[in-house]
Amino acid sequence: MSLQKGANVPVGSPRVRVELGWRTGPGAPDVDGSALLLTAAGKVRSDDDFVFYNQPVHAGGAVRHEGRRQDGTSALETIGVELSAIEQEIGTVVVAASTDGTFGQVSGLFVRVLDAETGAETARFDATGATSETAFVLGELYRRNGGWKFRAVGQGYASGLEGLATDFGITVDEPAAPAPVQRTAPAPQPSVPVQRTAPAPQPSVPASPPPAPRRPAPQAPPSVPAQPVRLSKITLTKAAPAVSLTKQGATSGGMRVNLSWSAATPPRGWMRKGKDAVRLADVDLDLSCLWELQNGAMGIVHPINNQFGSFDQPPYIRLDQDDRTGSSETGENLMINLDHAAEIKRILVFVVIYTGASSFAGLHGVATLYPPAGPPIEVRLDECTVPSPVAAIALIENVGGELIVRREAKYLLLPPGVLKQQAADLEYGWGMTWQAASKD
């Protein structure tokens, strides 16, 4: 049902999918969707009631930023809302959009509400007539007489996401983003002798690792303290592929690397079947990294054979868990200890499909690095068009004492007889030897 500004319609579904869409193209600015959970007073209870790219899951789990799908002409961001699970003191879920340009430069902006189970459209609002606005409240889900309704709002803000957020009671910390690095870090040279292998196993596991000294089981890295809400972010693109952690002051402490995925919406009537169907619940994705230290030691961090690494000892990288079902709200995270940045030579962050799908086609990923200082760094994985089960995300290199993050966003093909993790090794010249392995 198409709504005019100010109109409303009942929402009978206990679970809905709210989609924000717009047309992309040369010169079109980027758009980000967000949601705010408000009490009857029209304000958030705390900063936790703000769901957006830097805080994608509400503390109660009922509202989730589920990522973006994009093709050559359009983009779509999805916010999942489980209305039946929202706390009683929350009366309204505001659905908003913000842009790094103005909405006068954005064409085809719309919001629509779908039944999460059937995909049936409950409401749609097409926002038109925008000029200099940099943020928009597109619509809101609100309680009425024991049920829920959706209202088309269409209220613009000239003060961007910061102004919109503070208007609803969010405390915003907006650090200035540093200038991206102007040079691209040099590509690594595959000069490592094959016989100098380092510990690491996996469905492609470096063979015959040297024995490690016996020590107590590694402890999980310290939890990251709660941070003020940061609205700034750096998105690495083909045009601006690299940024310096050193120049933005991230020279000590723990840096978290998080990976999130969304699946393409199946056609109506799919009934959970079909040749090209992919469900995240069926796919086991393994966040991994190859590492090399300045002293020549190298290896892999991943869930195979419990190679979770160590935060306080070499390789100064720790994988927090193996989420085999996608049920974890935080997903899988790598923690990198920047107190030892001088000892790190390079780290390749990548992801492997362990089971559940033959390639990343139909899956859309976003990797976000959360440095201890400066804004988050985002790498979006473009839509996969090749039969690839391995995706290289980002390369972190120590270049003359400066730690550089470079966007990779590559889907790797497997040559005959090559294991999945081995494909990342061959592409980036780690030079290790591999043998097959599996999870217990």
Image: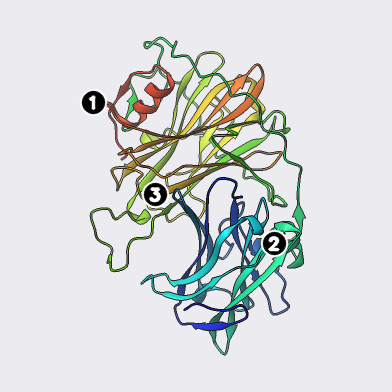
Q: Looking at this view, is 17 or 200 the one in front? A: 17
* Mark 3 and mark 1: Cα distance apart in space: 25 Å
Residue under the point 54% across and 72% down: 125
Residue 346 is at least partly visible in this image: yes
Q: CA distance from mark 3 to mark 2?
A: 34 Å
From this view, report whether residue 419 is shown above or below residue 325. Answer: above
Q: Residues within 10 Å of mark 1 (few under 14, many from 20)?
A: few
User: Which residue is tagged 3?
Assistant: 363
As drawn, is 148 to the left or to the right of 424?
Answer: right
| Residue at x-position 63% and y-position 78% | 91
Tell me where residue 264 sits by quadrant.
Answer: bottom left
Q: How is the image coloured?
A: rainbow
The image position of residue 203, as x and y in percent, is 31, 33
**Under tag 1, what secondary structure?**
loop
Q: Amino acid at mark 1?
A: Gly
Tag 1 residue: 417
SS for tag 3? strand
Identify the mark nearer the N-term, 1 or 2: 2
Q: Position of residue 189 (x, y in %)?
A: 47, 14
Compare marks 3 and 2 and give the one earlier in the sequence. 2
In the image, residue 41 sits, relative to residue 95, either above or below, namely: below
Give the side of residue 316 with respect to residue 391, left or right. Answer: right
Q: Nearer the viewer, mark 1 or mark 2?
A: 2
For disc 2, the marked residue is 131
Residues at circles 3 and 1 in contact by the CB criterion of under 8 Å: no
Other residues around mark 2 within 10 Å, as few (<14) / some (14–19) / many (≥20): few
